[in-house]
Image: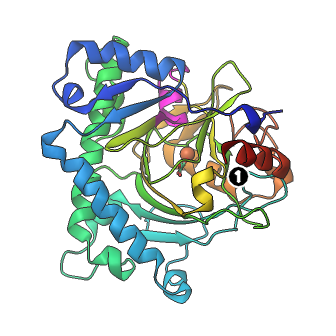
Amino acid sequence: MSSLANATDTCLSTISLAKLIRADPEIDKELLAACVKVGFFYLDCNDYESNRIVKEVEGLFQATRKTYDLPQDAKDDWIVDKDHGEDLPVCGYKRSGVSNGSVVGKKDGFEGIMVFEHALKTASKEERLAAPGPLAEQRELLSASIHDFHTVGLAILSSLSRALGLPDGQGFEHFHRLDEKCTTALGLLKYRKYTPTDEQVGHIAHTDAGSLSFVFSNIGGLQVLMPGSEQWSFIAPRHGCAIVNVGDSLQFLAGGCLRSSLHRVVPHADQEREEKYTVVYLMRPESDAMLKDPQGNEWRSVDWCNKKFAVFRADLAEMKLGSFLTGREGYTGMVTPKEIAVEMAQVM
Ligand SMILES: O=C(O)CCC(=O)C(=O)O
Ligand SMILES: [Fe+2]
């Protein structure tokens, strides 16, 4: 269906974080337009508080690289392969290749670590953080950056609520109160270097379960299916900018008027030379927030997240049932190895 052969870098709106935090009136309209049309935008963090977030993200990349350089055994100690119960661990790890990937017949090509916001906040300060060494050593950085991302997320949610004219007290931010129990997590991902014979490649096409995702990567590979087309386009990483997207929960809270966009990660020419690392803040509503999907079914926020994870882990036949994964009935948005070969040959 889709062809990588025509894939190009897409052009997204850029929102200034400094203006957003100042609640500049222009921003409300710009942000709403971006979230209605594409559901993806760049958030330029370079102009905010002497680059605080940019520096934090650099620190997180360093800690991520160190963590993935640990021996496999040390990472396996943190494996989590089950639903989010009521009490989340501080940290969970998944190996590469445990789910379906973005290429037909291949498994996923990334290792992932999730650091859960609520568990991190409530963890005993007297004890060492229950996380791999390089992350436990960076507890302050993890806490500070997660706090900053939450603040930025609330500013986006308030801006969208203003732009939509939601009554006072009913804005999206009220479903994301600081300190309430939630499945919000900081994801630290490492994608394998790409070789055509590798059986583990990319990240399957999906919409995000939560409200807002903030993605930072060293190299390309992330693609969005542009609304109203069958064209997948690369979203190039930009220094100091988060690539922000709307997830299912916010789409549901907004009654469908904000777009939870379909995206995936496929090999990019840069990935033949180096591994792709991603730092992603996955902001999700409070666990007890109630959501209504497009079919009118009601979900507790935590149950919607768990449903998505179960689909991620399922075999292909089960994945295709319903529209949980991609928002489209039976659609998996996979590419063929041939399409990748054509794309790579064009770029070289
Ligand atoms: O690694 C990326 O570029 C995207 C990651 C992503 O889509 C996710 O974690 O939900
Ligand atoms: Fe995603």
Mark 1, residue position: 311
Residue 256 percent coordinates (x, y): 56, 21
Whether residue 172 appears in this view of the structure is: yes
Does 247 lie within the magenta span?
Answer: yes
Residue 268 versus residue 16 in the image, above or below: below
- Dot 1 crowding, Cα within 10 Å, few <14, some 14–19, many 20+: some
Number of numbered discs overlaid on the protein picture:
1
Residue 325 percent coordinates (x, y): 69, 43
Q: Amino acid at mark 1?
A: Val
Rendering quarter of residue 329? top right
The coloring applied to the image is rainbow
Relative to 140, 109 lies left or right = right
Residue 47 percent coordinates (x, y): 20, 35
**Disc 1 element:** helix
Magenta residues span 245-258
Whether residue 170 appears in this view of the structure is: no
Q: Residue at x 43, y 39 (%)?
A: 243
